[in-house]
Amino acid sequence: MSDTALILLAAGSSSRLGMPKQLLDFHGTPMVRHAAETALRAGCGPVVVVLGAVRHEIAEALQGLPVEIVSNDQWAEGMGTSIQCGLRALEGRGVCGAILSLADQPFVTATFLRSLLTRHIETGRNIVAASYAGTVGVPVFFAAEAFGLLMALKPAAGCKGVILGHPEDALLIDCAEAAIDIDTLDDYLAVLERLSDFGYAAA
């Protein structure tokens, strides 16, 4: 997967949580570092981390990892601006595609990330997305041929509309782990309570 990039979207301010979710402890590791390590274990390259709010503190949590950090000065306008910031960092790099992922889905595995590319190769579909909890979304693979669809996003838009808007070119893969994300303190506490369910030993 060395020619498959991964864009880790970590620019938000975590307004509902009241503190940067990217820096929450997940089994002894900041959440954003755990997500970046998962991407690297999947063999993705380059791994581009898009930062915005609290960028300096989050960048510090990534020190020592072979990732590329880019800053999105328009992060407050919405997810679309971060996706496009990450894609611009890939211009001229010759990647076959890119996986979009988030810092707050800690139970998504490297194996699942690899499966997105595998299914693209097997089926030829240019969009391979996670399906969970009655919806679709990240993690999602977009072949380079589909990057234009993401560059046309409105600032506040995510990629869900693109996935649903191109059913003939999209493949959905069940990923219950992607449904477990963190927006509130209760979400975070629920994640900590479920560590053992996903093979993490008690701290």
Image: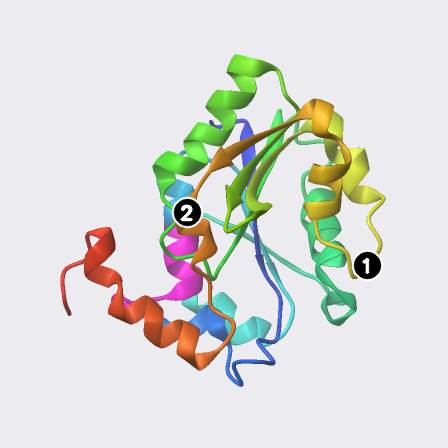
Which span is picked out in magenta?
Answer: 26-37
Q: Position of residue 169 (x, y in %)?
A: 70, 24
Front residue of this view, candidates 197 and 31: 197
Q: Quadrant of residue 60?
A: bottom left
* Residue 63 visible within the image: no
Q: How many marks?
A: 2
Image check: 140 left or right of 63? right
Q: Residue at x 40, y 36 (%)?
A: 112
The verdict on residue 80 being magenta is: no
As drawn, 157 above or below 149: below
Q: Compare marks 2 and 1 and give the one earlier in the sequence.
A: 1
Q: Secondary structure at mark 2?
A: helix
CA neighbours of label 2 inside 10 A, class few (<14), some (14 to 19), many (20+): few
* Location of mark 1 (residue): 155
Residue 189 to residue 86: above or below: below
**Residue 4 appears in the figure:** yes
Label 1 CA crowd tier, 10 Å (few <14, some 14–19, many 20+):
some
Point out residue 64 in the picture as x, y percentages from the top left corner.
38, 57
Determine which residue is flagged by label 2.
Answer: 176
Q: Amino acid at mark 1?
A: Pro
